[in-house]
Image: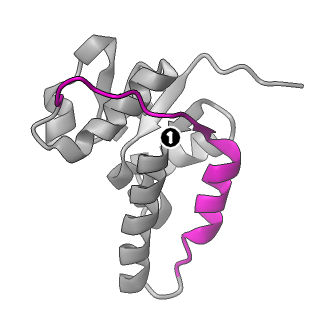
């Protein structure tokens, strides 16, 4: 039986990694995703950043292995080929990958606390929500 999600969400790296390493709203969001409450959408660029940042944090916190959760993401998140953006969207071009993924997947939500992303919330109908706001509005 295939589950059809009506809620597709792009999670920025800090929210994802915070959800793995700490409690609070990012943890609640990861839990909700693992319970099937929404579809997590990622691109190859986002996955690579998750892995890179996770490895750095893993070195700071020996005994925490991010690989199982990354494997879970690979198996259960939906991978999209990012759209090519005609112009930069965010002040930090490194953040554009989250919008490129949202546009490719038809997602209307990016969960992030990043000020560069929050500043352009509403771009092409895509809302950027802080983790707590996402939890309050959707979970």
- Is residue 70 found left or right of 130 in the rendered image? right
112 is higher (above) or lower (below) than 37: below
Residue that sits furthest to the bottom in the current view: 62
**Quadrant of the drawing holding the N terminus:** top right
Q: Quadrant of residue 131?
A: top left
Residue 92 location (% of width, % of height)? 14, 44
Q: How is the image coloured?
A: one colour
Q: Which residue is mark 1?
A: 42
- Is residue 79 found left or right of 87 in the rendered image? right
- Is residue 63 found left or right of 71 in the rendered image? left
Q: Quadrant of residue 95?
A: top left
Residue ID at (54%, 47%): 30
Q: What residue span does the magenta drawing correspond to? A: 64-89
85 is higher (above) or lower (below) than 74: above
Q: Is residue 2 magenta?
A: no
Badge 1 local density, few (<14 within 10 Å), some, or many (20+)? many
Residue 23 location (% of width, % of height)? 44, 59
Residue ID at (28%, 26%): 85
Residue 80 location (% of width, % of height)? 54, 34
Numbered disc 1: secondary structure: strand
Residue ID at (41%, 46%): 25
Residue 83 versus residue 138: which sits nearer the camera? Answer: 83
Residue 76 versus residue 129: which sits nearer the camera? Answer: 76
Residue that sits furthest to the left in the current view: 91
Can the viewer see residue 76 in this picture? yes
45 is higher (above) or lower (below) than 39: below
Residue 16 location (% of width, % of height)? 44, 52
Residue that sits furthest to the right in the current view: 1
């Amino acid at each position: 039986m295939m589950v059809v999600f009506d809620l597709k969400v792009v999670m920025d790296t800090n929210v994802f990694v915070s959800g793995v390493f700490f409690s609070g709203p990012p943890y609640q969001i990861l839990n909700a995703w693992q319970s099937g409450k929404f579809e997590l959408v990622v691109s190859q660029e986002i996955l690579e950043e998750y892995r890179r940042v996770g490895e750095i944090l893993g070195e700071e916190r020996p005994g925490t292995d991010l690989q199982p959760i990354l494997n879970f993401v690979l198996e259960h998140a939906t991978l999209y080929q990012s759209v090519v953006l005609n112009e930069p969207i965010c002040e930090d071009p490194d953040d554009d990958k989250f919008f490129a993924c949202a546009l490719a997947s038809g997602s209307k939500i990016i969960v992030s606390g990043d000020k560069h992303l929050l500043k352009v919330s509403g771009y092409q109908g895509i809302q950027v929500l802080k983790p707590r706001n996402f939890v309050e509005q959707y979970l």
